[in-house]
Image (cartoon, helix red, strand yellow):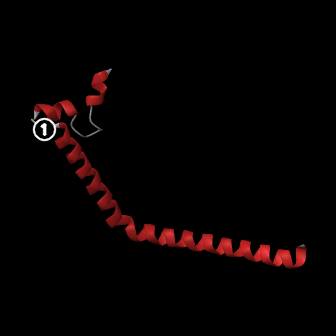
Amino acid sequence: MGSSRLLGPEGEESLSEGFEKGKTYMDQVRERGQRQYEILDKEIRENGEKWLKEMAAEEKKMQDEAMKGMQNRFFGGFWGG
């Protein structure tokens, strides 16, 4: 039961394997953090521009919807009640 915590994510060495190689717990945490950073960095480089365009389009859509809502409330108040 407790040994399941020593297993690393798929494709990574387990904590116990790292300990056998003389790595401390913090060494292993740092290495995993570095690998995660590299994966995220690669994703941003490959998809960052696309993500920014998608975010800008979504923001524009939300602004347009908010403006329509304000116009409806304003003009509805004028004529509707």
| SS at badge 1 | loop
Q: Is residue 65 rendered to the left or right of residue 4? A: right
Which image quadrant is residue 4 in?
top left
Q: Position of residue 19 (x, y in %)?
A: 14, 32
Question: Seen from this angle, which residue lies furthest top?
Answer: 1
Quadrant for the N terminus in the image: top left
- Nearest the viewer among 17 and 68 is 68
- Of the 4 image quadrants, the one containing the C terminus is bottom right
The percent coordinates of residue 76 (x first, y second) are 84, 74
Indicate whether 9 appears above or below 40: above
Furthest residue toward left? 22
Image position of 49 (left or right of 75):
left
Q: Which residue is mark 1?
A: 23
Seen in the image, is 76 located left or right of residue 49? right
Closer-to-camera residue (27/61): 27
Q: Amino acid at mark 1?
A: Lys
- Residue 24 at x, y = what percent? 15, 37
**How many marks can you see?**
1
Residue occupying image coordinates x 16% and y 32%: 17
Q: Residues within 10 Å of mark 1 (few under 14, many from 20)?
A: some
